[in-house]
Amino acid sequence: MVFDVTSEKETEERMNKMAYNDSLTGLPNRNWFQSYLEATLISAQKTNTSIGIMFIDFDNFKRVNDTLGHRVGDGLLIQMAERLQTCIRQGDIVSRQGGDEFLVLIEDSSEDEIEEIAERIIKNMNHPYMVKGNEIFSTPSIGISMYPIIEDNAESLIEKADFAMYLSKESGKNNYQFYNDELNQKMKRKIMLETRLHKAIDNGELAIHLQPQINLSISCLAGAEALLRWECDLDAFHLKNLFQLQRKQD
């Protein structure tokens, strides 16, 4: 007796594709990417080769979705995925993380080579997109982590590339940033300062000081300037850096 199992195999293939491929762009999804990265890390440890991970987020994508609608947003994501694939080398892998976030796996490459790829991505992504009659600009912010500079597991490499991506956004967007421990400590310090500032009113650390303004021509008090000062145990250098970073974000 012969049974036709063609339909069962086709169903299995479709299920596998749904499990490991992004339905919108056709790219590998995060589940597939992380599994592949884990296997690649094991191989890299044996062969003493390097791995680069790029975490890419597109600036202002949410605004496109909110103003032009999800159909335009989906069309934009498809074009972004297509462009990304033209920027990488043969053998490198682009994956969609979710939303407007993408991951790129670059095997056996130096930091200089990864920089070249990042610069190529930024250059190509700066050209406008045409989606359903709409001309759209959306630039990339890229975070990069590297093995063996970071000796860690697959999930941690992705997280650190993600962290570096947020640093690239803070430094003005449309650029790339490599992860390192110094930047990590800087960000932790900034988060601590911001947390302290949010609690400053409840802790009674904010005080208003009036600074007199003198009219020298008539030697008379002309008014006063009100200054809000944060009276805390933090040094002026770190406070200045906090407010400079906050102004850049705003």
Image (cartoon, grey):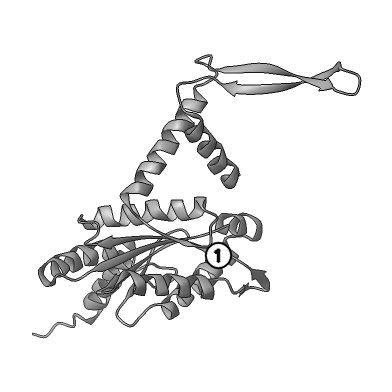
Q: Is residue 139 left or right of residue 44?
A: right
- Name the spot of residue 5 as percent of width and height, x first: 19, 80
User: What residue sits right under mark 1 in the picture?
Assistant: 139
- Name the spot of residue 239 as percent of width and height, x first: 51, 32
Q: Residue at x 35, y 57 (%)?
A: 161
**Could you tell me the amino acid type at mark 1?**
Thr
Furthest residue to the left? 1
The residue nearer to you, when weighing 18 against 121, is 121
Q: Is residue 109 left or right of residue 175?
A: left
The residue nearer to you, when weighing 37 against 112, is 112
- As drawn, 56 above or below 241: below
Q: Quadrant of the C terminus?
A: top right
Crowding near the residue tagged with mark 1, few <14, some 14–19, many ≥20 C-alpha atoms within 10 Å: many
Q: Is residue 240 left or right of residue 130?
A: left
- How many numbered discs sit on the rendered protein? 1
Furthest residue to the bottom? 2
Q: Residue at x 56, y 59 (%)?
A: 61
Tell me which corner region of the image, top left, top right, bottom left or bottom right, holds residue 65.
bottom right
Q: Residue at x 44, y 68 (%)?
A: 24
Q: Quadrant of the N terminus?
A: bottom left
The residue nearer to you, when weighing 236 against 30, is 236
- As drawn, 53 above or below 210: below
Furthest residue to the right? 218
Q: Is residue 131 left or right of residue 231?
A: right
Tell me which corner region of the image, top left, top right, bottom left or bottom right, holds residue 17.
bottom left
Q: Secondary structure at mark 1?
A: loop
- Name the spot of residue 197 as percent of width and height, x first: 51, 27
